[in-house]
Structure formats: C-alpha cells, structure tokens
Image (tube, coloured by chain):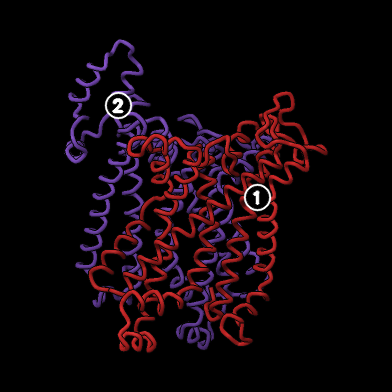
Amino acid sequence: MTRFVVSRIGQSLLVLLIMSFVIYGLIGLMPGDPIDMMIASNPMMTPADAERLRALYGLDKPIIERYLNWAGAALSGDLGFSRLYAQPVLSVIGPALGNSVLLLACTIGLSVSIAVPLGVLAASRPRSLLDYGINLFAFAGISVPQFWLGLIMMLLFAVVLGWLPASGMAPSGASIGEQMRFLALPVATLTIATVGGYARYVRSSMLEVMRQDYVRTARAKGAPLRRVIWLHALRNALIPFVTILALDFGSLFSGALIVETIFSWPGMGKLIYDAVLGNDYNLAMVALMFATGLVLFANLLADLAYGWLDPRIVVGGAQI
Amino acid sequence: MKPNSPLALAMQRFVHHRLAMFSLGVLTLLLVLVLSAGLIEQLLGVDANGVDLMNRMAPGDEVHLLGTDELGRDALVRLLYGGRVSLFVGLVAALIAATIGTLVGLAAGYFGGRLDALLMRTTDSIVSLPSLPLLILLAAIDLEKFLPSTLANSENVSFARIVVIVSLLGWTTVARLVRGATLSLKERDFVLAAEGSGGGHRSIMFRHILPNLLSPIIVAVTLSVGNVILLESGLSFLGLGIQPPMASWGNMLTNAQETIWEAPMLAIWPGLLIFVTVICFNFLGDGLQDAFDPRAEL
C-alpha cells in the first residue's frame, strides 16, 4: 500500500514538474513579451532601452535558464506580479480559487443528489421508461455545448422571465439568498450537463452490485427489497462512482471555464482565460499550474480512494 | 459480403438500432446540405460574406430564410458554411487523433516492457490534465515565433491550428483501447502462427493485429468526432478557434451573444446545430458499439 501511494504521488509530482516546464515554454510563445508591453505603454523608450531591459529581466537568456530562474523564485514564494490586476499573483488567485470551489461544490452537490436516486431507480427498473429517459438525458448532457446551454438559460431566466441576474456575482456582504440567485444559472447549466452521465454511472454500478451473492442472501433472509437496495447495495455501488467523480473533475473544471466566462463568474476558469487573452504572463503561468495541480490531485485522490474505500482491491500484486 | 460474416451480422444488428439509423440519416442530410452550401447560396441569390448594414438582424423572409445576422449577412447560408468547417474539423482531427492513438497503442501493447510503461504513463498523464485551459493556451500562442510568417499568416491557419491542437490531446482514448486489445490479440494463435512463419514485427502489427482492431477504432472515432466538434465550437466561441470572417458554428455564437436581446434566434440556431450533430455522432457511435460487440452491456 505505502509503496503504491508513494509511487503514485511521485508520478503526480513528476507530471506537475514536466507540465510547469511545458506551460512555461508555451507562455513564452504567447504574442509579444513583457518588454513589448512596456514599449507600447511608453513611447519614450528606444530600441536600445528595450535591449537593456531585456538583459535586465533576463529575457535574452536561453529558455532553460529563464525557467530555472522562474522556478527558483516561485519555490521561494515569489510568484510575480499580475499585469492585469496590478497585484501580486497569489492575491488574485486566492479569491478566484474560492469562487471556483464554491461553484464546483454546489454543482457536484446538486448533481450527485439528483443523480444517485435517479440512477438507483433506473437500475431497479431496467428498460423502463425512466431508464430510457435517463439514458437519453445523459446523451444530451454530454452532447450539448455548455456555452450555448448557458446562453439559453440566460435568455430564458434572465431576459424573458427576468427571475435571475444574467451574470456576475453578488457583491461581498450580500445575503446568502442573494448569492444563491447569482449562483443559480451557472450551477444549473453545469448540473444539466453532468447529471445524466452521473446517473448512468450509478445505474450501471448498481446493476453490477445487484447481481452479487450478498444481495441475494439479504433478499433470501427476508429483507425487504427497498432496504436491500438503499442499504446493502447502494453503499457498494457508490465506490466506483466516487472514483469516477474524482476522475471526472478535470472535465468538470474545463466545463466550468466556459460557464464562468459566459456568466462572468470570477473563478479560476475565467481568470485563466482573461490572463491568457490579456497577455498577463505571470498570472497565466501560476493559474495554469494551480489548475493542473488541482486536477492532478483529484486524479490522485481517485486512485487512492478506490483502494481505501474497497480494501479488496489489489494494486500491483499486493493488497492495499 | 457473405451472409453470415461478422460484418454482415454487425450490419444486421446496426440496422435494428433505430436511434443510430435515425442519427445516420440526420447526419447524411446535414452533410448533403453543408456540401451544397454554394448551390443554395446561388439559388437564394444571397452572399454568405455580403455585408448589408441596412438590413441587420432582419427576421426571415423569402430571400433570407432564417433572417440576417448583425452585419446583414444571410444566417442560413452562413450556418451551412459554418457547418462545413465544424464537420470538417471534427472528422479530420478525429482521424488524426485516432491514427496517433493507434500507433501509440499498437507499439505499447505489442512491444510491452519499458516502452509500454513509458507510453502508458504518458497517456495517463495527458488524461489527467485540465484539457480546456491548456487548449486555450495552445490556441493563444503566436505562430510567428517559430513558423515562417507566410505560413503563420495564411488564411487557413486558424483551421490547421485547431486540428493540430485537438489531435495533440485527443489521442489518449484510442491509445488505451488499442493497447488493451493488442495485449490480448498478440497471444492468439494466428499471431503466434504468423510469428512462427517468420513474420516481421511490422507485418504482424499492421497486417495481422491491426485489422482486428478496426471495429473498436471506428467506434472511438465516431464518438470523438462529436467531442472534437464541441471543443472546436467552444474554442471558436471564446474567440480562439476558427477566426472570422470564416464562419463556424462556434464563432457565430460569439457575435450572437452580444445581440441576444435583439435577435435571440441568431443564438439559437448555431447551438442547436452543434447539439444535434454531436448527439447524432454519439448515438451513431453507441449503435456501432452495440453492433460490433453485442455482449457489451453499458
């Protein structure tokens, strides 16, 4: 077990390290460089000044050296300054991360609390109307462009009906009810896109469990079907579902980027988008690293949770 | 085709999959429509790029069947040209990704050992990355920094760029699938026989193993066409994919978002077409999967 955990953590760290170099290289390929930005904002600068500045900031050095300088500074806690927000990068990322967590937590909470009962019902009546309905809804969920779904929701609930604010976030200090009103449309959009797929996972994993011997034993000793389904079977059916949730976190995070952009929700996705489009190199670098780290961590958790929730699972020849 | 060959049996099962057959019909119709976009343009006497500022966001009439967009261009013809781009990007990128994935999976599964470990850890790592943020970064890089400027500024560069970046991250599913199947195929008697009769690695991989992998690959490609179209439209919507004046369903929605109060239908049509196309490819893939592998139940 320990060996598996250690090697799995090591692998994640290695990927994070490689990605930091890849992202750094790619950001170097973004249009312009910081000196171009300074020249654009200051017409007094001559090309000779620009060269001197490049040397001063080390931009004339080879990329490996620049990367190592950046990494050294980052590890000592200096993540640089955001050009767009005129603040240290970390104090921009902090609130954005919080907003994303709020959005994603509400989405996962809502989506799971709808998907689990639906999946269980569908599994207890395979090939019923409900089963087909869920299947269809799951297909629709993975096929709908989330930006379009968001626009339609906005059109319907904000423009036509006028029930909810079209975009943005409640001002700080607003009541919880007011904050919920701003959360409603982005959460609903992400939930519609994910709930069908989740329900399908629950369904297939329930069907798997319902075939097990202990379920038959429970029925045979006279436990009522409802009790067997919700108490005996569901607990085990949720094990693969939990890992799928964690594995799916990356795609949820990606979807959230688009939804955050449409609804002007100031989360990590929108921050990354704004930083990349606004040529805010420092912010883009750190925000992308945070996003990568977060998704890698969710994947790591998925792998570890699988063994932890179900001790029967054997990894790499040894029981963990 | 022999009456009871595996392919014939698969065809029979596929024909009975009503949703998949219906999707195939819808996609065929769509393909015919987008390919005849030029013809329809002439028949209606409109011009897809003809800006008419006196006639902006007009409702539909007998010339502009779906009305005009925010620059007075015909919405229907632009939808068809946009569909041509979106479908083409989807098909080409899915095929390239599948080719990469097949080569990686074949090599990993067939040779095994360290190569397998290396390729599969790479695949796992790519799968566990946040794809859209990275795609946005890839879409924003400045091609002039490493390509000759004639190439970097050519008209089709936004098209080629999106195909390349989607293929770069999209090959992992096929690679895993092909590796798994190769692992079991390479122990089968016909492969051992080919080895025994002196077949080289290349001939065994491509002439004996690969043909047996075609059905899962076809399913995976079909399913990924839908995904690619979603990615392309998402990136184009964010202003990072297909660049105007070339129309794509995604970038048509960008403009429609700003005029959503005045002309909501302009925002409905492109998204509806993306939705219908993607869901049809997904149903088609699902039907093909059932047809090729009737034992696999969800």
Closer to the camera, A297 or A292? Answer: A292
Q: Which chain did the image draw in red?
A: B
Q: Return the residue found at the far top.
A: A44
Q: Hey, which quadrant is residue B294 in on the image?
A: bottom right
- Tell me which chain appears purple: A
* Snapshot quadrant of residue B31: bottom right
The residue at which mark 2 appears reads as A34
Chain identity of mark 2: A
Give the image quarter of residue A12: bottom left
Q: Which type of secondary structure does the marked residue at label 2 adopt?
A: helix
Q: Position of residue A40 (x, y in %)?
A: 35, 18
Does residue B119 sit above or below A78 in this rendering? Answer: below
User: Quick one: label 1, few (<14), some, or many (20+) residues within 10 Å?
Assistant: some
Q: What amino acid is found at the position of numbered circle 2 in the picture?
A: Pro
Q: In the rendered image of this protein, does residue B96 appear above or below residue B267?
A: below
Residue in the image at 54% along x and 40% along y:
B237
Q: How many marks?
A: 2
- Measured Cα–Cα span from mark 2 to mark 1: 41 Å
Query: Is residue A161 among the parts visible in the rendering?
Result: no
Q: As displayed, is residue B256 above or below residue A1?
A: above
Instruction: Identify the residue at image location x=54%, y=66%.
Output: A200
Q: Which residue is mark 1?
A: B273
Expressed as whole percent of the image width and height from the top left, the position of residue A320 reads: 26, 72
Question: How crowded is the residue under tag 2: few (<14 C-alpha within 10 Å), some, or many (20+)?
Answer: some
Q: Residue B72, percent across and down?
A: 70, 30
**Closer to us: B29 or B152:** B152
Is residue A28 in sight in this rendering?
Answer: yes
